[in-house]
Amino acid sequence: MGSRRVASSVVSTRFVIIGGGPAGNTAATYAARLGAQVTLIERDVIGGAAHLWDCIPSKTMIATGGAMSFTRRIQGMGLEHQDAEVDNVALQDRIEDIQGRLQSNTIRLLESQGVRMIMGSARFIGPNLIEVATADGAEQIEADAVLVASGSRPRIPDWCHPDGERILTTRDCYPPKVFPTSMTVVGSGVTGVEFVHMFSSFGASVSLVVSRQQVLPSKDPEVAAVLEDDFLRRGVRLLKGARAVSIERNGDEVTVSCDDGRVVRSSHAVLAIGSVPNTDHLRLELAGVHTDNGYVNINRHCQSNVAHIYAAGDVSGKLPLSSVASMQGRKVAEHVMGLHKVVHRHLDYDKAASAIFTEPEIADVGLAEADAFAVGRKIRVTKVPFSSNPKALINNDASGFVKIVSDPATGVVLGGSIVGRHAAELISVIALAVTANLTVSDIVESLLVHPALSESLAEAAE
Ligand SMILES: Cc1cc2nc3c(=O)[nH]c(=O)nc-3n(C[C@H](O)[C@H](O)[C@H](O)COP(=O)(O)OP(=O)(O)OC[C@H]3O[C@@H](n4cnc5c(N)ncnc54)[C@H](O)[C@@H]3O)c2cc1C
């Protein structure tokens, strides 16, 4: 994004944003660019939980773990096997270095747009008045529009008391103070399976408590099956149909007990059972804003029931993804500055691409095969395995597949999933097709690179 400010007839709009994560900082940058007078309030770190605890540190750990597991596979590539060892201090330095760089970039961008940043904790005094408690005292700020982008935090049930050492939330894992020799992961959604992958790549013996009969219960069963196979191949113990009911620590040992009587002992346990919204301290009731289980109810413009108060990101209770939070922030900025009256495309949450950074990587977008069948919609499904792709063979990693779901009458691409190396990158092609209503022929007729994994996309679109 450039640093030019766009002239606007509503330059005086005073826009106050609570939370400097992807939702808040994107809204701040775009609104300032469109001419708003923006104040961004953040109590921890500009960049938000996404940079500090969630996306960035988890993916950095996964990248290092992935390099480690890659060294175990190099024999097949004409190299001698070498064992790698984790250097906990170097790993932590690397995470902090990446976080620092990303934070500086974000702050520079906000400064270049003239955004006022205040480090402090915000709460409502009234619908147009925000109070910020800073290290130097309190300040009150008047606002014409407010964005609540205060994010979420890990859900901790009352039967579990994380100690930050061996009973962990996801936030204590980057890296844990003592590296786990064995780990029990409680929760088998996206975060849970990523933590299984992370710690098993580092050589820990991992158990996963899966409350249903399938890991990733909301995903395509075929996709989940590939991941389960990989976990079993790596020796991960799957406790299906079990709910954790207590986690106790005794010295260096942690015991997870399940409702069916099964018990797992390990050096560490991590809770990955979802999140709760950060709204309890905001005094939203003083602004008349309605919430549902703490999440702010929003309409398609991200407005709450109070028209000038918006919510975006995890706190809005929509898809808890950094990419979605940023896009919501952008849409809020456009709405606050009246741009939606000129040009506005509504956010279609059903077209959000998402990825799971496991091995193999999993990514999907748009309509899933199972969902189409559930509503009796006619679809065409084409699937191509990476085992026939030259680049996958060269990479010594030919597991996984590309699946494209399209409309049999028009050829319009409705969705797709990819399992395999670089799936998170490759899904962009299908995501673009889904957003822009492109057809399978548009993909087939693109002149792609050879040898490349993307050739399987063209093949699946045939
Ligand atoms: C382990 C893990 C890994 C993840 N990995 C990915 C991934 O790979 N890709 C992806 O797209 N998503 C990922 N997510 C989800 C992603 O992190 C969130 O969807 C994203 O952070 C939401 O952005 P946000 O702006 O709503 O909130 P946040 O990033 O949580 O930022 C909110 C900010 O508001 C601040 N705040 C709260 N209350 C106040 C207050 N009263 N005053 C001032 N400031 C306040 C907080 O300090 C925080 O900095 C992951 C989540 C987890 C848990």
Image (cartoon, rainbow, N blue to C red):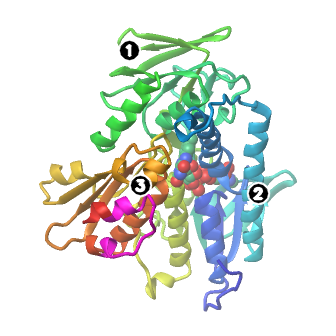
Examine the structure image and report whether residue 316 is included in the region drawn in magenta. no
The dot on residue 101 is 2
Residues shaded magenta:
442-458
Q: How far apart are marks 2 and 1 (CA)?
A: 45 Å
- Residue identified by numbered label 3: 390
- In x, y percent, where is residue 451? 45, 61
- In x, y percent, where is residue 430? 37, 64
- In x, y percent, where is residue 438? 31, 74
Q: Do the residues labelled 2 and 1 touch (CB within 8 Å)?
A: no
Labels 2 and 3: the sequence-earlier one: 2
Q: Which residue appears farthest toward the front when viewing the image?
A: 78
Q: In the image, which is nearer the foreground, mark 2 or mark 3?
A: 3
Q: How far apart are marks 2 and 3 (CA)?
A: 36 Å
State the SS at label 3: helix
- Residue identified by numbered label 1: 259
Q: In this view, does 123 lie above or below 11?
A: above
Q: Does the residue labelled 1 lie within 8 Å of ligand 1?
A: no
